[in-house]
Image (tube, rainbow, N blue to C red):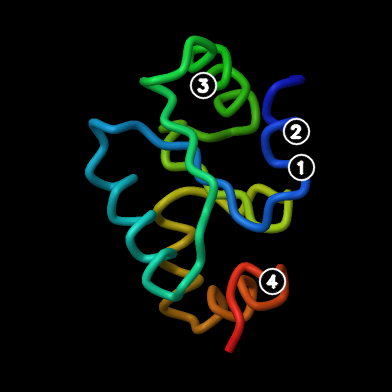
Amino acid sequence: MAIIPRLVTDKAVVIFSKNSCCICHSIRTLICSFGANPTVYELDERPDGQEIERELKALGRKPCVPAVFIGQELVGGANEIMSLHLQGKLVPMLIKERAIWL
């Protein structure tokens, strides 16, 4: 597991995604709707995409995308992000990591 830590270092929000995944698009849209500018890695466009998928699966992500990191920590996928949003916890997390300012 060497690729993911390098890709999330010093970034407030990172989303591992695939172009063909409508759920990935929805999660990206939700996070951007608060004014955040996440770093998005489209695994189906990267030569190392399959290796990153293997690393995400090793972290327990099934399906492996979307995978959202906030403050270099794996928060989870669509279910976890939506749950945090509905509980009113997503925006405070984004503020804490300086992904958005209010």
Amino acid type of the residue tagged 1 in the rendering: Thr
Mark 3 is surrounded, within 10 Å at the Cα level, by few (under 14), some (14 to 19) or many (20 or more) other residues, namely many
Instruction: Answer few, some or many: residues within 10 Å of disc 4's Cα (few below 14, many 20 plus, some between 14 and 19).
Output: some
Q: Which of 11 and 58 lies nearest the eye of the viewer? A: 11
Q: Indicate left or right for 16 with 71 as reference.
A: left
Q: Earlier in the sequence, mark 4 or mark 1?
A: 1
Label 4 belongs to which residue?
98
Q: Contact, CB < 8 Å: mark 2 with mark 1?
A: yes
Task: Point out which mark residue 95 bears.
Answer: none
The relative height of residue 45 versus residue 6 in the rendered view (above or below) is above
CA–CA distance in space, label 2 to label 4: 19 Å
Position of residue 70 measured from the top left corner of the image (x, y, whole percent):
64, 57
Q: Is residue 57 above or below residue 11?
A: above
The secondary element bearing badge 4 is classed as: loop
Q: CA distance from mark 3 to mark 4?
A: 27 Å
Q: CA distance from mark 4 to mark 1?
A: 14 Å
Residue beneath label 3, please? 53
The mark that comes first in sequence, 1 or 3, is: 1
Give the total of numbered labels: 4
Looking at the rendered structure, which numbered label has been put on residue 5?
2
The residue at which mark 1 appears reads as 9
Q: Is residue 38 above or below residue 98?
A: above
Front disc: 2 or 1:
1
Crowding at label 2, few (<14), some or many (≥20) Cα neighbours within 10 Å? Answer: few
Q: Are marks 2 and 4 in contact (CB under 8 Å)?
A: no
- Marks 2 and 1 sit apart, C-alpha to C-alpha, by 6 Å
